[in-house]
Amino acid sequence: GNIYAKSKKDGLRGSDGIYLINTDVKIESEGSGIVTTNIGKKNKGAIGIEGAKISIVAGEYGIVCAENLHVNSSDIYCKSIIEDKKVDGEIFIEEGSFTNE
């Protein structure tokens, strides 16, 4: 499926985690693009991206992940003001997945 988010704050936000599989995503946000939190919850807040095409233009961070970030077989373009990725856990990114690196 396709997801388009245009926001004054964060584009996509989840507390337990966000999983984007075989989808096209376009995010334009004044805050951060994709954000997870895990306030008071252990092992929550991961982001998983598999087989996705993602475009993020963000006024803060591109991706903010409260746990682990997993990216496989995806094409991610990210333009952000502060930083493309802020990850509190481990980062597992298949080489070539971020087209702007």
Image (cartoon, helix red, strand yellow):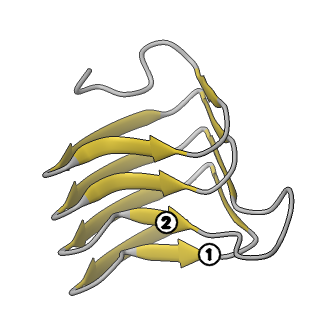
For this rendering, which residue is in front, 76 or 31? Answer: 31
For the N terminus, the image quarter is: bottom right
Q: Residue at x 46, y 67 (%)?
A: 2
Give how far across and how far down residue 98 sits, in percent: 37, 28
Q: Rounded to the nearest whole Å, what is the CA distance between mark 1 and mark 2?
A: 6 Å
**Mark 1 / mark 2, whichever is N-terminal:** 1
The residue tagged with tag 2: helix, strand or loop? strand
Amino acid at the residue labelled 2: Val
Q: Residue at x 79, y 76 (%)?
A: 40
Q: Residue at x 29, y 25 (%)?
A: 99
Kindly identify which numbered label has been placed on residue 14: 1
Q: Quadrant of residue 38?
A: bottom right
For this rendering, which residue is in front, 34 or 42? Answer: 42
Callout count? 2
For the C terminus, the image quarter is: top left
Kindly identify which numbered label has been placed on residue 35: 2
